[in-house]
Amino acid sequence: MSGPRTHVVTGAASGIGAALAQRLHARGDRLVLLARSEERADELAERHPGAQVEVLDLADTAAVAAWRAPEGPVDSVLHVAGVVDLGPVADLDAAVWQQALAVNLTAPALLTRTLLPALRSARGTVVMVSSSAGITAHADWSAYAASKFGLRALADALRLEEAQHGVRVSTVFPGRTATPMQERVHAQEGADYDPARWIDPGTVADAVLTCVDLPRDATVPELVVRPGPR
């Protein structure tokens, strides 16, 4: 790899996204970070001097569709941001479904569409950070799992479409990871939260970077990461 590369990252304010942004910034790569609010944007700009930080609410589909790509080639787009609200199908209202699908599925599709010319120019990599819920759905996880199943389908189709342009597409399926989202999930489940039981966010970040940094003679279509034995 020669010279700094450019990466567009969602969800960089916490958890896996924060670990990714930290690693990429530390090695001198150029970051384009999408933040949900001005407050989060200010935090990211302070944390990663020199990064291009933009406010974009991924739940606002119209704003996502209108977003403009940065100038120049883009070496990777890392879709890490996500939302989760648990509950049985009988109790979930339309707002829960709309937000899950907008943030977890529609936003990655639209952002990738916008970035494709820049990704093709760099022969870049798209990484969808899914979830073990994107492989197997459990009770009370319908909205989240459906959005993550859809993310897998998006990646599968995109992989076939963009191979001719040299764009690689990977889906990473982390199991439970010690993030603020996981703490919120435990609260919804009424369970005690012990981060030591789950995967460190940096470990998942390393898995994502394996897909991004892999030599051009290979690709990782899918990568499953599970908590190790304790």
Image (cartoon, grey):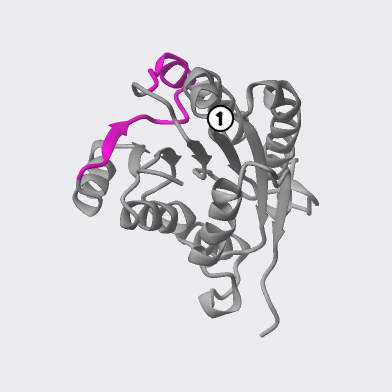
Residue under the point 35% across and 46% down: 29
Q: For the residue marked with disc 1, what is the amino acid?
A: Arg
Q: Would residue 138 be visible to someone looking at this image?
A: yes
Where residue 208 appears, as percent x and y from the top left, is: 57, 52
Magenta region: which residues? Answer: 50-69
Disc 1 crowd, CA 10 A, few/some/many (<14, 14-19, 20+) = many
**Which residue in the rendered view is the most extreme toward the bottom?**
230
| Residue 225 forms part of the magenta stretch | no
Q: Is residue 39 above or below residue 121?
A: below
Residue under the point 62% across and 29% down: 167
Q: Is residue 209 above or below residue 75?
A: below
Q: Is residue 66 left or right of residue 124?
A: left
Q: Is residue 85 above or below residue 6?
A: below
In the picture of the structure, the residue carrying the numbered disc 1 is 123
Q: Is residue 163 above or below residue 17?
A: above
Where residue 36 appears, as percent x and y from the top left, is: 36, 37
Residue under the point 73% across and 47% down: 222
